[in-house]
Amino acid sequence: MTLCINPDCRFANPNGVLFCQNCGSELLLQGRYQVIRLLNNQGSCTDTYEVLHQGVPKILKVLKEWEPKEDIEKQKLIELFERDFQVLSKSNDPGIPKVEDCFQYITRNSHTSVHCVVMEKILGINLEEYIKQLGRPVEPQSAVTWLEQIVCILKEIHNQGIIHKDIKPSNIILKPNGQLALVGFGEVRRFSQVQHLTGESTHIYFPNYTAEEQTQGKFLPQSDFFALGHTFIYLLTGKDQRELQSNNILVWHQFVNSISPELIRIIDQLIAPSVEKRPVNADEILQKLLVFKPTHGSTVNAEEEQVKTKLRKRNTVTLPLILGGLALIVLSGGAIFSLAANRRTNSATGEQTVSPPPPQCSESTLVKKSGNLYGVIEVGSTGIKGEVIQELPKVNEEGFKFIIRDEDIEERNANAVDPKAQKEAVAAVKGMFSEMQRRFNIPCEQIVIYGSSGVASKAPHKDALAKAIQQETGRVMEFISGEEEANFVFSGVVPEWRRKEVVMIDIGSGNTKGAYQKSTQQGESVTFSIPLGTKTFTKEISKNQGNTDFIKAAENAKLKLLVPEIRDIVQRKPGIQNSSRVYLAGGISWVLYTLIRPCQREQTIENIRDERVARFGEISAEDINTFYFNATGDQKTLFAPDLSKCTPERREQVQKDIEKIRTDVFSADNLIAGAEILRAFSSELKFSGKKGIFFARYAIEALPIGYLIQKLESAEENVTK
């Protein structure tokens, strides 16, 4: 995709097009920059894009047009935007992105012009995201190292007469080599966040990290120091400023452990309300940091090191060692870093002690001990997945009592089906188990583990795998069948008030399963399954293809294999055909919705019992036919849906999803096979006559929720016996 940067257009064009198919504006900026995605435009007069120049990603900053009624003087904004970049273009500091180009872009017919700057793209992870992935604050030793690095960068830009004005965790990047870089130069906020006072400056206000004098139009080095202090309070506490307010007073000391009084004093001085009480310049801060030993940077906490290691080049690690139960890594140059899971530093002596990892659980079954959080780990055929599930005090307005928490737990890549990879799978489960205990304080008795139906049917060593996992965690791992999966997904996706109306169909890669509820008996669901999914059906088609092309072979296989399976289910379980609503789940259903309904307008929900847009996307039987014809025709059309009606945020997400579908999820043959499965169900179950057909957006979360509900119900039954 190539994006148009015309503020009035922003159309997503297919690759290879030189002029926007919507507004006619030039797409290859300056004859060399291809705009591939929008990174940020929230609340700012500055859009940030990623562009490609000869295959190398760069950052494009665009100062947008604004309405004349907005109380901002145009020329001053342009000067403010361009001045800093002109100065930065002379800097060679590795912690500052290099400015490579500055130009004015004029749209078709010269209706609009915008000012553009192209900069180096700094590779790495921003510190806000780093804290989220780490799952806890950084250790004081790392904070001191980072503080020194950022102060040195500020010294460089302050000496050139630049005030950054937007220091915050998301504008600091941890690079793959372990060094920090400062980004976010040139951000200009909308008029509602700008105060234009008399004088020479255009005044910009950034909430949360902004000093009082900055809101009054005074930009000083001390303004950056104020924001820097608050940034490091976030890094050391893991909490946003708003969480640390008590009666309009910032209270943060009580949320940090093992932090030296010297570091507390430095940060308190940085955030002093009065400019006069803050350091005069960067050199003064660097002088104060000399009290710390110069080797402080070599004592990095274990989890921090694990996150950083993902960013380092492979050749920096030369040899892993295990010494006396303490994991070590030897880096090039001979420096040794500990990977102990629970290291703490004595603030008085500087000595470190290592506490052993939490013991394995003594209970093998689910026991509700404390809190309302549960951990669910799925050992699947494509990896180890984990979810943190919260039990609500009562059923929410959407009909659910259990919800998936937003905090991500990184999926572990381990092939549980392969007996040779058993150790890796067990280690992945154990790591995720410990992470749930450590990050979320979930008692081990409230963490459950199950093996998917794919592992159950394909792993010859499944019993040995389950035994090894129990030895490492103390928890029993059960294997569930395809029909059990369907039942769990049904209970996790379908609200209680819809259960007598809905048939849920989950088209997986290996099989297709589903469920509906009997209308005669409350709570009893009927499940069904077909041993063909998107990828297994593709294999069957290829196996019986012969000299026929794949499309014709797929249609033949549908008639010979799929349709008889579905008709057999309808004959044995007629309720599947009588349901007035259909909920579709699984990978191919997601692809259908993404490529055919990418910008579906959000509807107003007046009836609480209607399907809410947040959880369901409405589709039609005709959409399934369109998907089939696009998949079997020119797939360029399939991967180039109309995104003109998408919001910028939705457009960016859809573009990512399309690229993922094209390169990672399914092959062209998989799409054809999946489309035939959808068509077979649509025809045999008469989708065109249903009240509604919906893609269940969060069906992927329903399986762990459904499994947890079953285990909780079993635990309650055992207590009452």
Image (cartoon, rainbow, N blue to C red):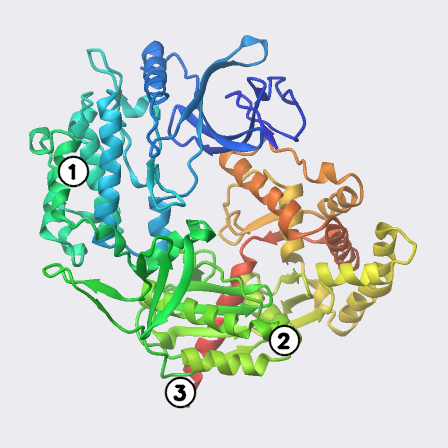
Q: Can you tell which mark lies on residue 459?
A: 2
Mark 1, secondary structure of its residue: helix
Disc 1 marks a residue whose amino acid type is Leu
| Residue at figure coordinates x 60%, y 75% from the top left | 419
**Badge 1 or badge 2: first in the primary sequence:** 1
Q: Nearer the viewer, mark 1 or mark 3?
A: 1
Q: Can you tell which mark lies on residue 206?
A: none
Residue 195 visible within the image = yes
Q: CA distance from mark 3 to mark 2?
A: 36 Å
Q: Residue furthest front?
A: 333
Q: CA distance from mark 1 to mark 3?
A: 65 Å
Crowd rating for badge 3 (residues with CA inside 10 Å; few <14, some 14–19, many 20+): few
For the residues bearing labels 1 and 3, Cβ distance under 8 angstroms: no
Crowd rating for badge 1 (residues with CA inside 10 Å; few <14, some 14–19, many 20+): some
Q: Can you tell which mark lies on residue 286?
A: 1
54 or 635, which lies in front? 54
| Residue at figure coordinates x 31%, y 75% from the top left | 324
| Number of dots carrying numbers | 3
Residue 535: percent from the left, percent from the top? 72, 60
Residue 125: percent from the left, percent from the top? 40, 44
393 or 80, which lies in front? 80
Question: Which residue in the protein does label 3 denote?
Answer: 720
| Residue at figure coordinates x 43%, y 72% from the top left | 430
Specify whether 254 is left or right of 600: left
Specify whether 547 is left or right of 188: right
Quadrant holding the C terminus: bottom left
Quadrant holding the N terminus: top right
Q: Residue furthest right?
A: 547
Q: Which picture quadrant has residue 161? A: top left
Residue 404: percent from the left, percent from the top? 44, 60
**Badge 1 or badge 3: first in the primary sequence:** 1
